[in-house]
Amino acid sequence: MTTPTVTKMSAKEVTRFIIGKEALFILDVRNEDAYQDWKIEGEGIVSINIPYYELLDEIEPALKQLPPEQPVLVVCAKEGSSQFVAEQLAEAGRKDVFYLEGGMKGWSEYLEPVKIADLSQGGELYQFVRMGKGCLSYMIISEGEAAIIDSARMTDAYQQLLADKGAVLTHVMDTHLHADHISGGRTLAAKYDAQYHLPPKDAEEVTFDYTKLVEGSNIVVGKEEIIVQPIYTPGHTIGSTSFIIDDQYLLSGDILFIESIGRPDLAGLAEDWVGDLRETLYARYKQLPEHLMVLPAHFASPSELGEDGRVAGQLGVLYQHNPGLHIHDEEEFRRTVTENLPPQPHAYQDIRKTNMGKLEPDEDTQREMEIGPNRCAVHDN
């Protein structure tokens, strides 16, 4: 008997469902603990979990739980198990059944480019949404030059946009030493012979050369002087640095998110950094113009996605609605950002060491280190 052909669905196609808030039913066949820790979510997404081993001999339990007229996507860790289950569903007569290409590992690594704006001097600003990980990175392009901020480990999407725009990468920046994902900054800087910028207070233990981010120094991108201005805003790490672009956009790193604020505990110095975090959020940022559009380095929930997939919020509006900006008692603020926090990111200490250059894990190990959601926010959804 010929096995029915089933179709794989790419991470890009799943992203389209989430951004468009379209209905998609997911049968996740990973073990229950993996599913509970991290799964595909979105306003139009409904998912159930039936571990693969429960479906090896009998597919009927899954068939009974699937909606009659709706696309069904089968998901596993790497792809193989979901393909097998999808084929069993199709053989049993189920139509419109797909499996996720690359599994959750592929989902974790996909970057969706979103154009944020045309800048006032003719440049462009792009946001790269890592939907499966909640990470955000940025590219500024002007007059054939480009800068990338908070690069992901996977660099193909950036290289593709650079090629499409005919731009040369001249600057790479990380707002801080990341603990939840491996930066692609050094890789990109080496490939394009670009300057790699880091906050010096976060880079005291790095093993490689870098250019120091210093408050008040401008980084020029292009002949029209699109200015990226570092603003020293400690709290998430002691060196956390923000950027203002075109007097319109505030790249806040992991200090301020759309629905939350950054956590100060990922270097083991939460008690020491609480005051810095509060000073940044309640004083330094408070002095900035309210019209600035905040572009963070992470998001925690699909509810933070705009209609086109972008993650952004006006600073003045965030001061009205973000719960992390309404903790006026200092002791309550200290407790909020140091106690009862979400679990720390998977392998975060090894990720920090990798970003310092102290570890050089192979590609498979890097994938394993990054598996799971980001957990950089105090109020994780």
Image: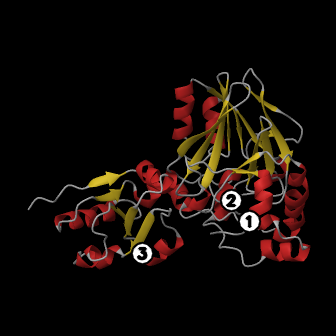
Circle 1 sits in a helix, a strand or a loop, which is it? loop
Circle 2 sits in a helix, a strand or a loop, which is it? loop
Tag 3 near tag 2, CB within 8 Å:
no
First of labels 2, 1 by sequence position: 2
Q: Residue furthest left?
A: 1
Amino acid at the residue labelled 3: Asn
First of labels 3, 2 by sequence position: 3
Residue 68 can be seen, yes or no:
yes
The local crowd at label 3, few if under 14, some if 14 to 19, many if 20 or more residues have their Cα within 10 Å, is some
The residue labelled by disc 2 is: 179
| Residue 113, horizontal then vertical, whole percent | 55, 42
Labelled disc at residue 266: 1
Labelled disc at residue 341: none
- Mark 1–mark 3 Cα distance, whole angstroms, equals 28 Å
Amino acid at the residue labelled 1: Leu
The residue labelled by disc 3 is: 31
Tag 2 near tag 1, CB within 8 Å:
yes
Give the position of the C terminus as an image quadrant: bottom right
In the displayed structure, does residue 169 sit left or right of residue 63? right
Circle 3 sits in a helix, a strand or a loop, which is it? loop
Residue nearest the viewer, comparing 177 with 4:
4
Residue at 55% across / 46% down in the picture?
308
Residue 262 can be seen, yes or no:
no
